Amino acid sequence: MVKAPALRPRLPDLYRQHVASLREAMAREGGTEVNEALRALIERVEVQADRIELQGALSAMLAAGL
């Protein structure tokens, strides 16, 4: 059985801030800022034969249904 990740109480707020930063950077077409915003949400990408898994804050939030 896989242990569920411990979630920080402010995780939904943190996610909203990261997404807002990403939207702002995309609106300004700031390539470096967009990359930094994405890296803050995604730690690692694992490519399997039948799927691609995102590891990090984004996947934990999605798994928690936030």
Image (spheres, rainbow, N blue to C red):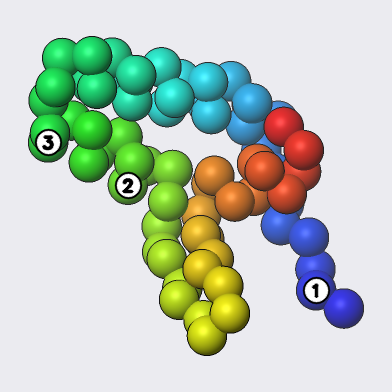
**Residue found at x 15% / y 14%:** 28
Sequence-first disc among 3 and 1: 1
Dot 2: element: helix
The residue lying furthest to the right in this view is 1
Cα gap from disc 2 to disc 3, whole angstroms? 11 Å
Sequence-first disc among 1 and 2: 1
The tag on residue 18 is none
| Three-letter residue code for mark 3 | Thr
| Three-letter residue code for mark 1 | Val
The residue lying furthest to the front in this view is 50
Dot 1: element: loop
Q: Characterize the local packing of mark 2: few (<14), some (14-19) or many (20 or more) Cα atoms within 10 angstroms.
A: some
The tag on residue 2 is 1
Dot 3: element: helix
The tag on residue 39 is 2
In this view, the mark in front (3 or 1): 3
Q: Quadrant of residue 13?
A: top right
Q: Which residue is mark 3?
A: 32
**Residue found at x 46% / y 73%:** 46
- Assess whether mark 2 and mark 1 are in contact (beta carbons under 8 angstroms): no
**Residue found at x 53% / y 46%:** 57
Sequence-first disc among 2 and 3: 3
Q: Is residue 44 left or right of residue 2?
A: left
